[in-house]
Amino acid sequence: MKAIIVDDNDIARTTLAHLAKQIPNLTVAREFSNAIEAYHYLQFNEVDLIFLDIEMPEMTGIELTKNLSGKDTLIIFTTSNKDYALEAFELNIADYILKPVMPARFLQAVSKAQSILESRRENVEMTKDEFLFVRDSNITRRLKLDDILYAEAMGDYVKFYTREKMFAIHGKMKTAEERLPKDHFIRVHRSFIVCVGKIDTLQDGGIMISGKFIPVADAYRKALNTRMNVF
């Protein structure tokens, strides 16, 4: 697991780097004293995890997190201020550690991040043919792409619906969108991806698939109409 540390306090960075060295398979690639430098680094470099302070000059950790919203990078906030906890978790971070960072708490947070990464890698794997492999109750099952009606985001999960069953997979909608073939599926809402060939009807505000009404957001309507060849 590749990580970076972003904190304007020298001692804090040194402490986190020391703790990270004690954990196998965790490598700190870079350390940054401000969020702006970290942001520029992340535009050209992929990392799995960021240990991120919140209260920093010029750009806060909260602001950096919002600017990285399109990335799958996990974030663990390390801060001396507990008042940001609610706002931080609304950004879907991996964990929130209060300073001073204790070894046991640090290990717990890293283990949680590692579990999230493993879940992402194992739960949804696209093959080169017409199948999706999904982990269902600790069993990996083969799901035919042609059987998928639509996918729905629900918190930290993505639900894949077929006519017979629903599969709830831990992961992000962005990951599902990237892995579902674009010649068959289209995003119609921040929470929905649908199989174009399974759309029954288009109506005001949404579409119907197998008796289910799915909303269509204005931002996606033009692309959907073009895709459906609607005049």
Image: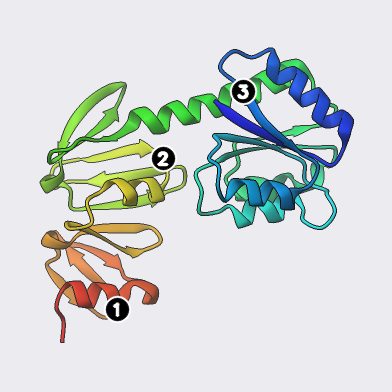
Q: Are marks 3 and 2 in contact (CB under 8 Å)?
A: no
Between discs 2 and 1, the one toward the N terminus: 2
Residue 1, by quadrant, is top right
User: Dot 2: within a 10 Å radius of its alpha carbon, few (fewer than 14), some, or many (20 or more) residues?
Assistant: many
**How much space separates mark 1 and mark 3, taking CA atoms?**
44 Å
Residue displayed at 69% across by 20% down: 20
In the image, which is nearer the foreground, mark 1 or mark 3? 3
**How much space separates mark 3 and mark 2, taking CA atoms?**
23 Å
Q: Which mark is residue 27?
A: 3
Q: Which residue matches tag 2?
A: 171
Whether residue 197 is situated above or below residue 132 in the rendered picture: below
Q: Residue furthest bottom?
A: 231
**How much space separates mark 2 and mark 1, taking CA atoms?**
27 Å
Q: Position of residue 225 (x, y in %)?
A: 22, 77
Q: Position of residue 63 (x, y in %)?
A: 70, 56
Quadrant containing the C terminus is bottom left
Q: Secondary structure at mark 3?
A: strand
Instruction: Specify the amino acid type for callout 2.
Output: Gly
Instruction: Specify the amino acid type for callout 1.
Output: Lys
Residue displayed at 51% across by 48% down: 71
Whether residue 33 is situated above or below residue 117 in the rendered picture: below
Q: Secondary structure at mark 2?
A: loop
Q: Which mark is residue 222?
A: 1
Instruction: Specify the amino acid type for callout 3.
Output: Thr
User: Dot 1: within a 10 Å radius of its alpha carbon, few (fewer than 14), some, or many (20 or more) residues?
Assistant: few
Q: Position of residue 74 (x, y in %)?
A: 57, 38
Q: Secondary structure at mark 1?
A: helix
